[in-house]
Amino acid sequence: MNILAEIKRRFSSVLSEYADHPAPLLDMIRPVQDARHGDYQANCAMPLGKKLGRPPRDIAAEMVARVDLADFCQAPEIAGPGFINLKISDAFLLASLETARRDARLGVAPTAQPKTYVVDFSSPNVAKSMHVGHIRSTVIGDALCRLLRFLGHRVISDNHLGDWGTQFGMIIYGYKHFRDGAAYSTQPVKELERLYKRVNALLEYHAGKAKLPQLEQALADKQAEHAAAQAAPKSDDKKQAKRDAKHLKDLEKSLADLRKQREVVQQKIAAVEKDDALRQDALSHPEIAQAVLNETAKLHAGDAENRQLWDEFLPQCRASIQKIYDLLGISFDYEYGESFYHGRLGQVVQDLEKRGLARQSDGAMCVFLDQFETPMIVRKRDGAYLYATTDLATIAYRLEQWRPDAILYVVDHRQGEHFGKLFAVAAQMGCENVDLQHIGFGAVLGEDGRPLKTRSGENVPLDSLIAHAIEAAHAEVCRIDEEAGLLSEEQREKVSRVVGVAALKYADLVQNRESDYVFSYEKMVALRGNTATYMQYAYARTQSIFARGGIDIESLRNSAAVISINEPAERALAMELLRFSEALEECGADYRPNHLTGYLFELAKQFSVFFEQCHVLKAETEALRDSRLLLCDLTGRTIRQGLELLGIQVVEKM
């Protein structure tokens, strides 16, 4: 039972007598920060008092008289100016613990209103190795799938692979012109990635050479405009002076943006010109941009040679990505890449035209939306389709096949405008009854506060990130086990793999997904603080109690032994155990796994206090020992279940 949700449900009818829209008032019913005030607190009497012009304590007294909580709460108490303090009754607490102890779901009931979710996550371009930029979508998406399934929903996970676009035109061109045959025969994926990078560098070089004069001119024009604005006499009118100051500030920002763009372009040009082989390739392939588009168009048109190469490249690239998924323990129900929808794209554009949603603009087919300055292009002048076209075809297919109530896109927040346009167009095409959600997330930063890169300035490969996490975990596991000596070297290696991958995932999931975060190997495997290592250690500690006492915990779990609550630390732990369903439903409500990591951290801390203050194996009586063993068991099972919902394994010993 979700106690908080039940309290809110019972207050809802009472609060509706005071407000037409009681939801904001219900949000003011929360768990207490200080256990001396009970377990939950309703703070809605104060704003009602202000609104109604009455003493808040009088309103609180009226609410207490009307709300019925007697079956699971002690008599409510009114404190201060009108706080309503609620304490769960011992009888209900013990009964709930008894239910949870014998229940595989730990007392968490599945939803009475299951929905069908499609979760679109990870979705790498298979032409390139996965890198640090893929970690967030992959682990957040997997966690959401696990959480929503546990809550009782039907969940369909779909890895929308980038397996068809311009990146394959780049690889095919590179294969035909720059291939190292020996390297391809021994390490094909590594060679294909080298070819992709080489062609990309040449594309950026030629694009940069064409763009640089335009940037220089734009910068000169903006500098002149800025100088004129600086030299202009200051207005005596305050409003005008304020507008002038804002204009000057906007000009300075534009100048900074243009200088940054010029710097990036100059760096890309210099990277080619300082490399003799690349410079020669650039001179030999001046029309490479159009040539790559031609190779892509040939592939899409069914050209035999290019299709044969694509059929050869794709399985090798996909197998390389699978190694990462295997390390992370990630799987998908479906993997329908962009190629799967290619035959549907023409129909998408035709449907848009028939509905009067799309029209030609400068040779391209576009959908114009009032809420956006730029249109959504669905077919370019040269007839090529775009990501938006594929995404619309994907939505149509998902509606036909799976009839979802919601589709979640776990994608970098920088794609917000794309999804805003996509959802707006999809709604006009008949998708208005499906909840389309962009589950955005921030960037992974280095210690310098910039996106995490290698020393050479490239994205950190994901396999390298995982390897370093396991290495950092091995050092921590060896340190923890140094005195106890419980693990053999083989066991240390195995535990380190589990702990390292867990640390990497948890370090991401513990963040508010919309925030950027600074990545640190040292912090993520630390035994203190809100880390996976701390959670895994707390679980291992529960198992070590059973091992030391020779306890058959499954037999005890199903025995006639009962849980009793005698000490404050026992009660605090018991209350935290019963809040598991609250944390899960909170995750499901706004798709934020960090609600669960926060809950697990609080549970582990309460268990640590309990462990220090309440003897378990040396309890005064056998009944008390069994009660505390059952609390340890519930704690361990809850931590294990919570971590499993985050895609994280536990270890029995650390």
Image (spheres, rainbow, N blue to C red):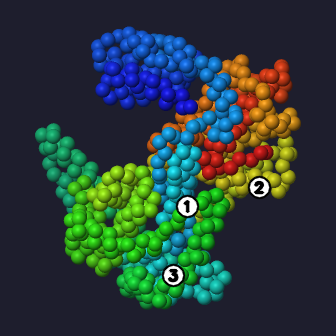
Tag 1 secondary structure: loop
Query: Element at badge 3?
Result: helix
- Residue plotted at (37% across, 13% down): 59
- On screen, residue 570 versus residue 461, left or right, reads right
Residue 194 locus on image (x, y percent): 55, 78
**Height in image: 548 above or below 653?**
above
Callout 1, which amino acid? Answer: Asp
2 and 1 marks in contact (CB < 8 Å): no
The alpha-carbon separation of the residues under discs 3 and 2 comes to: 38 Å
Name the residue that disc number 1 marks. Answer: 333
x 69%, y 33%: residue: 101
Report, in whole angstroms, how far the alpha carbon at label 3 lies from the one at label 1: 24 Å
Which of 99 and 447 lies nearest the eye of the viewer?
Answer: 99
Question: Residue 2 shows which numbered tag?
Answer: none
Check disc 2 and report the residue beneath it.
494
> Which mark's residue is nearer the viewer, 2 or 1?
1
**Residue at the spot x=64%, y=79% of the render?**
187
Q: Which part of the image, by quadrant, shows the C terminus?
A: top right
Q: Is residue 331 above or below residue 38?
A: below
Local packing at callout 1 (Cα closer than 10 Å; few below 14, some 14-19, many 20+) is few
Name the residue type under label 2: Lys
Determine whether the residue tagged by mark 2 lies in a helix, strand or loop.
helix
Of tags 3 and 2, which is closer to the observer?
3
Q: How many marks?
A: 3
